[in-house]
Amino acid sequence: MGIENLLLGFQVALQPHNLMLAVIGVALGTIIGVLPGLGGANGVAILLPLTFSMPPTSAIILLTSLYWGALFGGAITSILFNIPGEPWSVATTFDGFPMARNGQGGQALTAAFTSSFVGALFAVVLITLFAPLLAEVALKFGPPEFFAIQLLTFSSFVGLGGGSALKSLVSMLIGFVLAAVGLDIVTGTLRMTFGITDLMKGFDFIVAVIGLFGIGEILLTMEEGLSFKGASAKMSPRIVWDTWRVLPRYWRTFLRSCFIGFWMGFKPGGATPASFMSYSFAKRFSKHPESFGQGDIEGVVAPETAAHAAGGASILPMITLGIPGSPTAAVMLGGLIIWGLQPGPMLFKEKPEFVWGLIASMYTGNVIGVIMVLAFVPAFAAILRVPFAILTPLIVSVCAVGAYSVNGRMIDIWYMLVFGVIGYVFKKLDYPLAPLVLALVLGDLAENALRQSLIMSQGSLLIFLERPISGVITAVALFFFALPVITPWWRRLRGLPTPAVSPRET
């Protein structure tokens, strides 16, 4: 993988019409990312038929640029309105929305966009240097390793999340129950549908997130009395520069989140668990964990960096092994096959201009993306000046359209409202929503990996400890689960005071 290959890629990516496609893709992706319910995968799927007449390299540049734009756009509504545009933006709401309410929307957006760029750049550099080696590592992951990683994600929220471990477990349990509703794809039986046909498909994750965060926050705001005054929001372009001067302080968080995101992305794990896990680690290792959930900029840096590192890394198994690392990569894989390209190691030799053009476009697409979104930070922040009482009907309408667009069913709007009430009750009782959301999105994946592993071992749980990779990951996960019990005991043993529980967990 010489430098000449990358230069060949840049010769392709920097051609004027390919640069123009990258700009169009980023712009479309940003719009799609902002709208809850659509998502990058749906956006790529909608655009895919339009690329059939294009050369494959130009087509993949357009689609990947749309993917980067969706990743950037997902943070905008998460920070401004507490409505995650994408599943991986859920963790960004924990501190991004409080920052916006505190008049720091511009800083939160700048931190999110910059972190996204850093995470994506880290992933692309590693792909450039180590693509074949990393592909071999990804091949060693089977169902036991996948389940061990899901277990580690769950345990990081219980052991590293702070606050009440019991409340986190209760929230997670409710998420698992909701994730289990619908058709069991292994046995073909129905679970907890109570004879209601509409429940056969279960609850879509994005519908639940829109309700839990968007509608739940609106109900809470209505109870407190709708404000007819907008939040203060500085519109000066200097907010970008001022935020950049602060961000280098969090270099450890950047570095840790890059590695977590890349590791979760290059094997089929995904950006959503990466963002949650990175947030938990950032909170655990922060000098001020009590400020998380109240508007800490580090709580925006961690999930956004990890999500983009995972998003970039998910392209790697698609081109080297033909295994998509994310739903969006799966749609792109379909495009590769339609264009007559066979993903795999031979693709590097047979179509170098395509592979290296794609890798080079990941550099140019991210640079174009971060410049475009940063240029509009003052405009995005200015939305906060509009009184919330005026924005509320618009937000509810966007939520309803987003929920409906997921499956094109009216029942999803009712689900959204029910989840909104659940989100409101959780916030009033000070129960964390994050473990519920995490269990809801990963519940099916974890269950399938667990059952496949048990079939492989004929029912023995030792399979998770006997295999080297899954054994190490499972041991770390069990340690994290035990941390809430070990930590107080260790502090009493050393005569240290017991820390106060955070007033509200995320």
Image (tube, grey):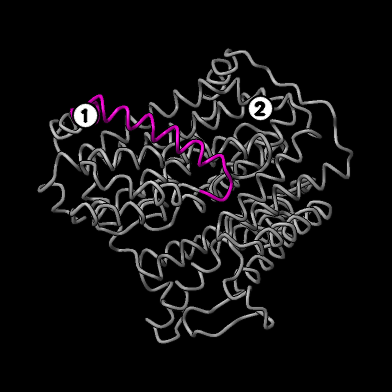
Residue 499 visible: no
Is residue 352 in view?
yes
Per the image, is 23 magenta? yes
Label 2 Cα crowd, 10 Å radius (few <14 / some 14-19 / many 20+): many
The quarter of the rendered structure image containing the N terminus is top left
Q: In the picture provided, is 121 more to the left or to the right than 389? A: left
Residue appearing at x 62%, y 38% in the figure: 77
Say whether residue 120 is magenta: no
The residue carrying mark 2 is 105
Q: Which residues are magenta?
A: 11-38
Q: Residue at x 51, y 23 (%)?
A: 374
Name which residue type carries label 1: Phe
- Residue 13: x, y in percent? 24, 31
Question: Which residue occupies the foreground of this view, 48 or 74?
Answer: 48
Q: CA distance from mark 1 to mark 2?
A: 35 Å
Label 2 is placed on what type of residue?
Gly
Q: Is residue 40 above or below residue 165?
A: above
View extreme (left): residue:
350
x and y percentages locating residue 17 in the rendered image: 26, 28
Q: State the image coordinates of residue 453 (x, y, percent, origin top left).
A: 41, 76
Relative to 244, 264 lies left or right: left
Which secondary structure class fits the magenta region best? helix
275, above or below 269, in the image: above
What label does residue 10 carry, if any? 1
